[in-house]
Image (cartoon, helix red, strand yellow):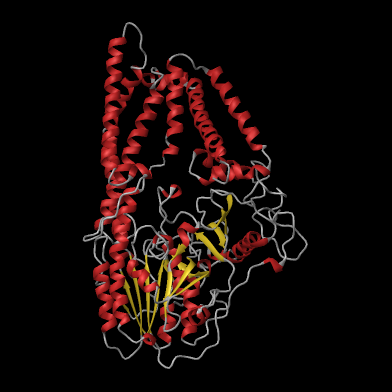
Amino acid sequence: MNGEPWSLIVLSPVVGIGLAAGLGFISFVLFAIWRAPFARIKPHIVANPLSPWTAGSTVLLLGAAWWVASYRASLLINAKIQQAYFESTLSVAVSAALLVILGLTSPLVWAIFHRFYQGLVFSRRRFRRNFTRAVLALGFIIVAVVAFKLGSKKADMLQRLPWVYVFPPLAALILSALLQRFGLLNRRIALRALALIAVFHLVFALLPSKYSSVRNTINTAPSLARLQLKALISVSDVDHDGETNIYMGQDCRPFDRLSGPGAYDVPDNGIDEDCDGIDTLSTALPKVGQNFHAMSKPAKLPNILLITTDALSFDHTTSGGYKHDVTPTLAKFAANATEFTRAYAEAPTTYMSIPMLQTGYWYPHLKITAGANSGSYPFGLSPENKTLASRLKALGYATVFVPGQRYFGKGNWPGLATGFDEVDMAGTTNFAHAAIPTTNRVLAHLKEKRAKPLFIWVHYFDHHEPYYMPSGGKVFPVEEGPLGDKISKYNSEVERTDREWGRIFDYVATQPAEDNIIIFTSDHGEAFDELHLQKPHSNSVRESETHVPLIIQTAKQRGTRIDGLASHLDILPTVLNLLGEKPPEDMPGESLVPALQDGKSPEKEAIFVSFYDPTRLDAKSAFMQYGAQGKDFLYFHNQDDAFTSLTMVGDSLGTKPVDMPQSGEAYMLRLYAEKLFHELQDNPPALFNRPESSK
């Protein structure tokens, strides 16, 4: 990663194991120092020097078992119960019950581990007895591991567990226990080891900023090293600007909060606030397309059908070049419409992308509320926000929302249905797959005779995780790798849902071309790679999670593929423009009417992408990640994990390193991302739980 695989292979584990070993040695030293005082209180525990290791192993095993069992139970509950509040409440209750049950077994587990560690001492007099104990303990562990694998295979838990956080401390625990048990570890040796670790970290702290790619590599993947590095950077950041001048940091003014790599470099003021060596010029910022192009209003208002589906990347579709034919009807529809091959969601998660698509504004500019679940997502969308439905309703449209999952209903996601006359939940079920009844409801509304033109929004959810083989679904081959089974089931779900989209496309094709506008897109992508073994989305702003299909069918430009940049924020101004209505001037999206009318590419040169947490109190830290997607590069900054990345388009894993230049498109993307980041964090209404005085 980032061209420095050696740093990930060598340095990251060294730092992580160093931390784990340090914790192990510290625990030994503390145990040795406080052994006498504790002996007066708990002589039966302290008398056995293996007690800390026995306790640690017991907690580790029972904790892992509890985590796995709780997650498996949550999957089963999720598949049957689609009401989020009840689902989460039941999951918590089941998790608590499992914790109590496992707690009752802790004495037995403690005894087994105690015997196991005793069995590691093979003295001549007790060799046979200790060997037997060791074999029995080892057999118990093997049986537990096998049972764990069999029980978690269906839930894909082995792929989801953060093993990198388990193995290093476990290795340090066992190593320290063995050294202590065989008399190879004492207080002097432990203190020397701690001194060596301290020297190592001192050298690590003094590495110059030119090795920042090493730090980025460590921060890219989950590891103990990343947790430790994040804490060290936070402690050494004396001016609290998110960066430091040690640990390979690039803060050129470590005592000035207004200057640093993350600071906004005000254009043309002669000051280098962002420490890149030059002052930003306003001429370096990217082009932004117009949100309206003059055109006459249609003689008759057309019906507007917005079809969104959950968790589908453009490159996982047939027309996007995927190796399996998972979306043949969507490809057929695209061949008779305008397809934007470089369309992006502005966020990698539903709770952000859907509100932005429906309102046409950046998420931080929206009025967000705590929602139905008291601060847990989906966060509420205040009725103060004008949605596409409310704007079309004002133009005389009948508005209908058909959610394919109860997650999107009024009771669970307040405000999402703002502007809709009707929210049709009749097609939703308590199970994962509801595409067939959802499509039935859409067709019923399309066939209904109305005095008003119709705007209908339907959202499909069938191929969102967890993945299950759909009834009547096509079977796809299981690919090699840890995600093979998941990808196969996902492909089956996508293909089965694609048939339902086809039913809608086929019906609309029987109507006059000028009577309907159809828009198809996905709320975000779904990634299946080594960076997404635990979560296929809601992970990062990499293009694997933001590159989505976008197909718009109007009476003109049928069968056109557009390679220019487009995004969700373009949808609302485009719809209004097609109706001859001018969007508000501050609406940031670009009208795609020139592409739909004349096949012209969009004018924009960058798309701002972000991952935003509206529950945080600080406006700056609410941006967990932010960046800019361009034609050839993606620039993004991960604030939570303190690393910056510049990758080429198509290189979501970051295998081809790109140094940040001081000119050209990549430089322009960074300027654009930093500009919008600083503008959007200025008193954003999206933070719903701040004190009133700060709003």
Q: Return the residue found at the far left.
A: 472
- At x 42%, y 55%, the residue is 527
Q: For this view, does 232 lie left or right of residue 453?
A: right
Q: Is residue 424 visible?
A: no
Q: For this view, does 504 lie left or right of residue 234?
A: left
Q: For this view, does 286 lie left or right of residue 354?
A: right
Of residues 266 and 23, the one drawn nearer to the viewer in this rendering: 266
Of the 4 image quadrants, the one containing the C terminus is: bottom right
Q: Return the residue found at the far right.
A: 270
Q: Position of residue 444 (x, y in %)?
A: 25, 79
Of the 4 image quadrants, the one containing the N terminus is: top right
Of residues 410 and 103, the one drawn nearer to the viewer in this rendering: 410
Q: Is residue 472 above or below residue 183?
A: below
Q: Return the residue found at the far top.
A: 125
- At x 53%, y 29%, the residue is 22
For the image, the number of numbered tags is: 0
Q: Is residue 53 visible?
A: yes
Q: Position of residue 26 (x, y in %)?
A: 51, 27
Q: Position of residue 335 (x, y in %)?
A: 40, 73
- At x 65%, y 33%, the residue is 203
Q: Quadrant of residue 372?
A: bottom left
Of residues 364 and 12, the one drawn nearer to the viewer in this rendering: 12
Of residues 650 and 164, the one drawn nearer to the viewer in this rendering: 650
- At x 28%, y 40%, the residue is 100
Q: Is residue 137 above or below residue 660?
A: above
Q: Is residue 295 above or below residue 686?
A: below
Q: For this view, does 401 lie left or right of residue 643?
A: left
Q: Position of residue 339 (x, y in %)?
A: 44, 72
